[in-house]
Amino acid sequence: MTSVLVVTAPEVDGPDSRYPSAHSVSTGTATGLAAALESVDASITVLARQTDDEAELISWLHGAADEGWGVVIDPAAFTSYSYGLRDAAALVVDAGLPVIEVHLTNPASLGEARQSSVIAAVSTGIIAGFGLDSYRFAVAAAGARVAERQRGRLEQAQL
């Protein structure tokens, strides 16, 4: 089975956010987000988590690298300055796994301070501006890359 960890950081589901929430599309929880994304592909297990704790996000990315999971990350408030999160994302990519940065809105349409991403440089790709579909596209792409990696390892083992 192919697993994709979907992690969201602060601002995504905050009551004061001026941007639509991925979580508000369903039950208001990371579990609801996972349920909304399960329909992307039946062969992909979606593990959705949300936290305001940067250290917890970093720990989850380390775990994804250890487990062989692809990652879809909406770094939200951490996008522009969290080098710890950037380094954790690089660890996942260095393990041969995809990290796809995702945003509900288009960061280029936000204020200048929100237009740069320290995570983008180490990400496999970025999908932004499509609301919840940004997550769906990212899960499909990450799942496909993890499955491709798994097939390659199986083929190598058979040689």
Image (tube, rainbow, N blue to C red):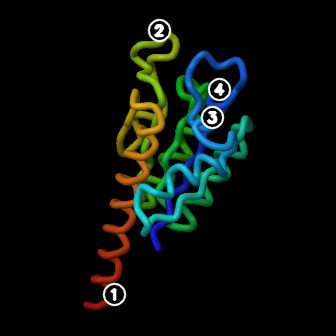
Residue, x 30% and y 75% (percent of image)? 152
User: Which residue is identified by label 2?
Assistant: 112
Query: Is the residue under label 2 in contact with that under label 3 (CB below 8 Å)?
Result: no
Q: Nearer the viewer, mark 1 or mark 3?
A: 3
Q: Earlier in the sequence, mark 4 or mark 1?
A: 4
Residue displayed at 52% across by 64% down: 45
Residue 66 image position (x, y, % from top left): 57, 65
- Judged from the image, the secondary structure of the residue bearing numbered disc 1 is helix
Which residue of the protein is positioned furthest toward the bottom in this rendering?
158
Question: What distance separates the C-alpha of mark 2 from that of mark 4?
Answer: 17 Å
x and y percentages locating residue 50 in the rendered image: 67, 43
Residue at 42%, 46% in the rendered image: 136
Residue type, numbered disc 1:
Ala
> Tag 3 or tag 1, which sits nearer the N-term?
3
In the rendered structure, the answer to whether residue 6 lies left or right of residue 138 reads right
Return the residue at label 4.
11
